[in-house]
Image (tube, rainbow, N blue to C red):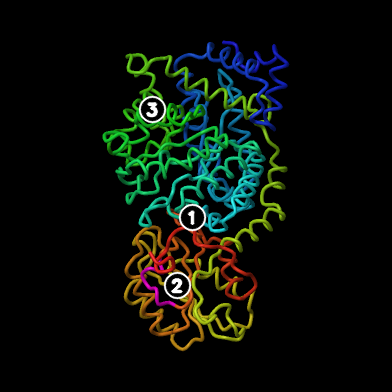
Amino acid sequence: MQTFASSRKLNAVVVLLAFLLAFVPHYLGFASAEETNVERLLEELSLEEKIGQMVMARVLEGSDGKPSERTKQLIQQLNVGSLLFYSFKDPGFAARQANLMQRWAENASPDIPLLIGSDFEFGPKTNIHSGATSFPQQMGIGATGDPELARKSAAITAKEARAMGIHWNFAPVADVNSNQDNPVIGVRSYGASSNEVGEFVAAAVRGYQDNGMIATPKHYPGHGDTSVDSHYDLPKVSFGRDKLERHLAPFRAGINAGADAIMTAHIIVEDLDPDLPSTLSGKILTGLLREGQGFEGVIVTDALNMEAIEENFGKVEAAVKSVRAGSDVLMSAGNYWDVIEVHDGLVEAVKTGEISEERIDQSVRRILKLKIEYGLFSGTNRVDPEAASKIAGKPKSRRFAEKLASETITLVKNEGGLLPLKDETSSVALIGVKDSINQLKKELEESSPKLDIRVYRTPQSSRYNNWSPSEAAIDKAVEVATGTDYAVLLTYSRGKMPQSQVKLAKDLLAANENLVVVAEGLPYDIELFPEVPAYIATYAYNRWNSPAGGHDLMTEATARLLAGEIEPGGSLPVPVKPIDGE
């Protein structure tokens, strides 16, 4: 079989154009050459190789953190077209592993480069442990009221990612967080206003794609009104026409901004398809997204091993239904055998006539076109690890992120001018349900070294009990806070707030009237204890309690706000009672 590497040598013009596309992804003067190139390669692919291009596998890691031999087998034997990863230790390491996987692809037959992606929702540090830039969560950026800041942070993310050999971001989140009990979207959303979310989504799409990274608004047609987490169960929603339009509008904004990919939601929207979730619904993916909203790019599923899909349909049946519905890329984020099952199940579905090969060709054309547009066939898919280490997390980007954090953090309530802490020799009790309280102590000691700081982290609270402190822990927290000049409580909720945290806040207020509550997750906590005199929203942690180990950026901003070193710039991007009187 003639490889693409050999065929491109026959057409120097196409190579030059593809090279230009690495820097100008939406250059329009190449359509004829691109189409010729896509068709030439498509004709040379077997059915199994075509379906391989449609499968996205997770990077399976060995004990050293590097892609394992099984990842190599998926690339070279199944010809998977794309990979996603959840964790690399630093930018140089990420670049070396990206190069390694691209070499494996070059040594496959056919030698088609890989698209490598990740969920960089709040910057590259989302899945790069150190050395990369971290930004506030999307709700925090929404709190700034300035979509240009979304564009700038997306641009930095794209530049750092491309330096590491990463082409595809499964962001921005385009969901409107209209249900404050939503356990899976929350601070990942820009806010509750459809129009404002749309403005931020469009800005982020431009920031990513103008700098060479594929943007992917998600989760279509909108996951923001659910009260069930699709990682664990299958949510159902009923919108009605007006509410449906509210959730579709940000996706339309992303499409109009040129988004090259859209990710599906594992939810049933009863108004559109009462039987099948969006990921498996032709009424939604083809009827609404393609025909109704005119989207011509790549449709990628959310992970097929999520229980909303796995428990109700099974990954193979789901993959077949999803392709028939209109999906192009199947995110098989499970183990090695899961990927093989999905691939082989799709092959069998074509051979038995359940899926036509013409339908497969439609998707593979879109995938190959995307790879050409982003310069993967021009040699730019190999990167310099040293350059990646210099570009990622550079001081200029860090300074921008710090300034963004101060624009994000929101002083919701400050009765009697309780903040900033007026007397730098005061005693302060820091109470928290998460380990971030220890980082706040460190940051506050650096900002205000004369403060007498006492710290208590409720030991029984963890993600396993929804961050619920025990009665004994609440009593101990009250003991620590009694008699201090100030008490600062860090709360965390990702949906409904645990009642034990509510009791903790109320008991602390009874013991110390100078109580400052800092909401590190959703900003709605104050609705359950509106009597607290001071309240700060940081939007710091998402549904996975990520970033792990403390969100240094927002914790630093919290310390600086308490110490009076910054003016908080954020405004609530979601309605919160009694602040908004609703």
Q: Nearer the viewer, mark 1 or mark 3?
A: 3
> Is residue 529 covered in magenta?
yes
In the displayed structure image, the side of residue 185 where residue 155 appears, left or right? right
Query: In the picture, residue 65 is in which quadrant?
Result: top right
SS assignment at label 2: strand
SS assignment at label 3: helix
Q: What residue is rendered at 47% in x and 17% in y?
A: 361
Please tell me how many numbered marks the rendered image carries. 3
Q: Nearer the viewer, mark 3 or mark 2?
A: 3
Density class for disc 3 (Cα within 10 Å; few <14, some 14-19, many ≥20) is: some
Query: Which quadrant of the figure contains the N terminus?
Result: top right
User: Where does the image place residue 314, in percent across and percent down from the top left?
Assistant: 30, 33
Farthest residue, direction front: 242
Whole-number angstrom distance, CA of label 2 to CA of label 1: 18 Å
162 w.r.t. 532: above or below: above
The three-letter code of the residue at mark 1 reads: Ser
148 w.r.t. 270: above or below: below
SS assignment at label 1: loop
Q: Earlier in the sequence, mark 1 or mark 3?
A: 3
Please give the residue where the numbered disc 3 appears in the rendered image: 287
Viewer-proximal residue among 371 and 272: 272
Residue 457's label in the rendered image is 2
The three-letter code of the residue at mark 2 reads: Arg
Q: Earlier in the sequence, mark 2 or mark 1?
A: 2
Viewer-proximal residue among 62 and 266: 266
> Is residue 371 covered in magenta?
no
In the displayed structure image, the side of residue 562 where residue 542 appears, left or right? left
Q: Earlier in the sequence, mark 3 or mark 2?
A: 3
Please give the residue where the numbered disc 1 appears in the rendered image: 546
Q: Nearer the viewer, mark 2 or mark 1?
A: 1
Q: Which residues are magenta?
A: 525-532
